Amino acid sequence: MEEQQRAMEVLRSHLTRVRIPEPSTRIYKQECCISFDSPRSEGGLFVDLNSFTAYGRDYVTWNYQKNGNPVYLNIKEVPKPESDNRPRKKPTLLAIGLEGGFDAKQQDYEEIYSIVILPEFLSLPFPNVDLPEKVRLSVEAVLASVGAERKEQVAAWTADKKKVSPFAHSLPQLDNGVLVPPSGWKCSKCEKTENLWLNLTDGVILCGRRNWDGTGGNNHAVEHFNATNYPLAVKLGTITSDLENADVYSYPEDETVEDPFLAQHLAHFGIDFSSLKKTEMTTAERELDQNVNFDWNRIQENDKHLEPLFGPGYTGLINLGNSCYLASVVQMIFATRDFQLRWYYENLNLDDAFQLAPADPTLDLNTQMTKLAHGLLSGKYSAPEKQVSEKDVAEGGTEKLVQNGISPRMFKSLIGAGHPEFATSRQQDALEFFQHLIEQVERSNSANPSEDPSRCFNFVVEEKIMCSASGKVKYTKKIDNVLSLNIPLSAAVNKGEVAIMEKTKAQKLPGEKGGKEDYVRPRVPLSACLESFCASEAVQDFYSSAIRGRTTAIKTAGLATFPEYLVLHMRKFTLEAGWVPKKLDVFIDVPDIVDISYMRSKGLQPGEEVLPETDGSPAADEMIVSKLMEMGFSRNHCEKAAINTSNTGLEPAMNWLLSHLDDPDIDTPLITKTDQNAQPVDEDLVTTLIGFGFHGNLARKALRETNGDVERAAEWIFSHSEEANSADMDISSGSNATGGVDKVLPDGPGKYKLLGFVSHMGTSTQSGHYVVHIRKDGRWVIFNDCKVAVSSDPPKDMGYLYFFQRIHS
């Protein structure tokens, strides 16, 4: 009793450090900002009642020491006793909740709250009538809120912004005298008191749709619409002062919508929305729970012979709903030494990362990458737990060891922020996500490029164009982080078997199908894919400045530098006629060791003569420009595309334009080289960039492009590699110096060992499932979301992305 009195006195002395959150305040209450601790972790979660960020028991002291906030709401979740121990039937249907399908029932938890005052961890129970009013209001607001983690997850699940319903603008509302009380609602046709919907035309309160398991409502609200055609209803219990999150449903449109006049429509029935509290889940939240809570890997049942792994480096990632592309890429990059060493794990502990973080660590990429690295590599969240699966229960089997893994929810929200695809919960292309992640890491380290861990993937591609008429050449360079390879089916080692299969298939009668054993996939060696990258290619209608006319040119490509980690992308997805995507059904024979030394480019050679530049700056090929303009692009865009691809042809220009349409400077008028070189540059800033390892000419160009901003200039060099490595790099000088960017990139021998590969199952990169296999501790390991196990037979011939590590002699 004396201890509680003392705790109350200390609490009262800190009331100035307690805030009452506004409806728009971001409140974290489900996941620690610096670790993957949750209310279910030992000690629970501590919500700072000033900043409303959350911390695990081992980390809350760091926040107190950094920010001086002493008052926290402690949230603990403890399992409720099982009320139903009856064995469940073995599923016979691939469905959730239907008769014969999987049971979506999850473990129930009880929440326990208390007020904790640091640094002594003095504790007061909640609810508590003796608490100061300010503390009580703050805690109640936190508990009533939808957590920021949850809001972001729901926003991603709904994917697209709710559309404004056309019925909202002219919604009829009857003057029938109906006034809706602030609580105590009940369906007007049955006894339901939950899942209630208020029709915004006549004010009738009715229950919602019946769920698959009999819960929910009795369909009275939708039946009322069918009888009256009154279009809009709002779910009672979702209306709060934050009206944007209220659940408004349009029956004619059959989807959740936005009603910009909701406040006015509610006032018609006497509802003061500012005083209402959230008591119900929205439709999106309910759909999200149903999708995320179900373990899709039960359906696959593909781990019955795999030995599960636990401990440091063997932590799985929970699938958030179509997030396997993220899990596969993240597991792969954190298997590299550069991402483990620099910043994120071995050279930076969590405490230091937190001290370096801004006020809100949830919005800082370096902090969240460090958190993710420690979560994956420390082994803290990879302890084995006993579990009895649905299959084991049905067959009277035994327990097996599993791990819960960690949820990358906070990281996914941050890395996808503002991106039209990665901010959603739709399936994505693992290649595009890898490059997006690497780009974000580059940006977050632009002030100190030499410490950027993503440099380990970067290399310089050098292209040589030789004019057939004059024999003169032009060299261009660009930085890339993925070597994208065509798959030459003509190089298949089993062409004869494939031809027999195709012939047999053509002779089958209409409707007759062959079995799987009759199907033969082409098998193409990886060496053939690499050789096709370096093969000579004829460029028709090439404009040669040497002859001032069109001719044929020969284009070849090689690598001016070799990366520490070589990423190979197999172009398995092609476009057929009508831009219809098709996946090549092909095997790639991938050896454990590859040597690409023969792909090393050598730059300008003795005796080679460089194609002359045109007056001051290269002119855009008018034929390329006109054909692109016929497709609907602006002249400025088309001229940039032609110039930045050295007028090599329509297809390269179109590819460049499509990949640069989102550039912030894409609409900036073209500046000739003469005009650009006339702009003065602060030589002190040039010296600063040279100190980062960049060539002086490159530094001046970047500073001119960014109006003298050093940080933006460093970022420009890496994000505009084609321009940065063009003629301004003085590659025509006769020396073989690479000119700047490649000097700060890793380089070394061209011999590599296979480290891992990402595989895709499905017909499109926007659907299906991704897994990753990684070689760890001398064995192959499969990472399939939160399941981690020894792989006895890794499918190396079915990869989509291959990651090779340099072999150092």
Image: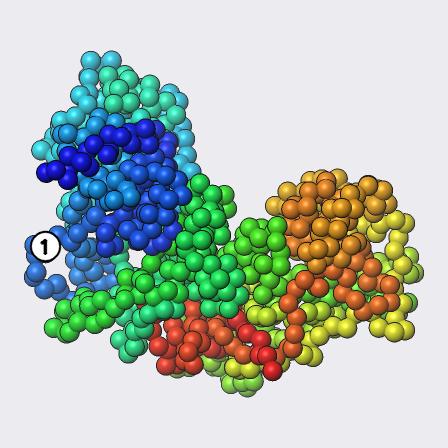
Residue drawn at 59 percent across, 70 percent down: 564
Q: Is residue 162 left or right of residue 544?
A: left
Please, is residue 726 above or below residue 332 in the view?
Answer: above
Q: Is residue 338 left or right of residue 38?
A: right
Residue drawn at 23 percent across, 71 percent down: 401
Residue 265 locus on image (x, y percent): 31, 20
Image quadrant in which the C terminus is located: bottom right
Q: In the depicted view, which residue is nearer to us: 384 or 578?
A: 384
Packing grade of label 1 (10 A; few <14, some 14-19, many >=20) is few
- Count up the numbered dots: 1
Image quadrant in which the N terminus is located: top left
Quick one: SS at disc 1?
Answer: loop
Please, is residue 522 above or below residue 565 in the view?
Answer: below
Q: Is residue 571 left or right of residue 17?
A: right
Residue 51 locus on image (x, y percent): 36, 37
Residue 803 locus on image (x, y percent): 52, 71
Q: Is residue 490 visible?
A: no
Residue drawn at 33 percent across, 58 percent down: 406
Q: In the depicted view, which residue is nearer to us: 273 or 219?
A: 273
Q: In the depicted view, which residue is nearer to us: 431 or 63?
A: 63
Residue drawn at 91 percent across, 57 percent down: 548
The figure's colour scheme reads: rainbow
| Three-letter residue code for mark 1 | Pro
Residue 775 locus on image (x, y percent): 44, 76
Q: Is residue 119 left or right of residue 480?
A: left
Give the quarter of the image for residue 168: top left
Where does label 1 land, which residue? 81
